[in-house]
Image (tube, rainbow, N blue to C red):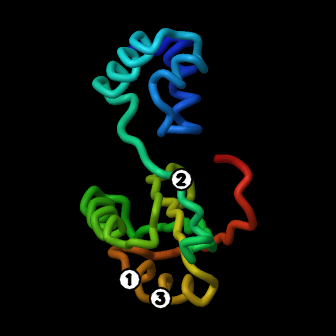
Amino acid sequence: MALDRMDHAILDVLKRDGRMTATELAGRVGLSASACSRRIKRLEDVGVITGYGAAINEAARARGLTVVVFVSLHSQTEEFLSAFERAVQRCENVVEGYLLSGPFDYSLRVLARDVGDYERIHKEQLSRLPGVSRMQSNFALRKVVG
């Protein structure tokens, strides 16, 4: 499905405030409420909009330390990749993960209370994931986008 300028405008506004009513959204993008509602429904039906969620202040939730972890596996066979992906999905502190090209196989975004908590997560969870041969942890200093 090709998205037009109006679809992109709707998505940009919804990304900033997913709780906005269709009437409020319509006023922001210059459509009638009914036309805006139809476009939102179409974007949901074709899978462009996959859900709605809340923006969480992780520091207030006592998970204010963000660590980006790059992971290399012993092998890149489908068996190794699948086993790793199944296991990492069960790690509650891993909130985002990507299969990569380049020198590392995966990038994980991990949330922890503090450095000591991350050390525990690293020792008890990440280092025990199947197929892991190497990890590089990078501590985020502050969020600049998103």
Residue annotated with mark 1: 128
Q: Quadrant of the N terminus?
A: top left
Q: CA distance from mark 2 to mark 1?
A: 30 Å
Image mark for residue 123: 3
The kind of secondary structure element at disc 2 is loop
| Left or right relative to 75: residue 135 | right
Q: Amino acid at mark 2?
A: Ala
Q: Amino acid at mark 3?
A: Lys
Residue annotated with mark 2: 55
Q: Which residue is drawn at the image coordinates 63% and 85% (left, top)?
A: 115
Image mark for residue 60: none
State the residue in front, 95 or 52.
52
Q: Which residue is drawn at the image coordinates 46% and 53% (left, top)?
A: 98
Would you place residue 85 above or below residue 15 in this image? below
The kind of secondary structure element at disc 3 is helix
| Left or right relative to 114: residue 1 | left
**Where does the image place residue 77, in percent across and percent down from the top left?**
31, 58
Residue 136 visible (yes or no): no
Residue 45 visible (yes or no): yes
Would you place residue 4 above or below residue 59 in this image? above
Q: Earlier in the sequence, mark 2 or mark 3?
A: 2
Q: CA distance from mark 2 to mark 3?
A: 29 Å
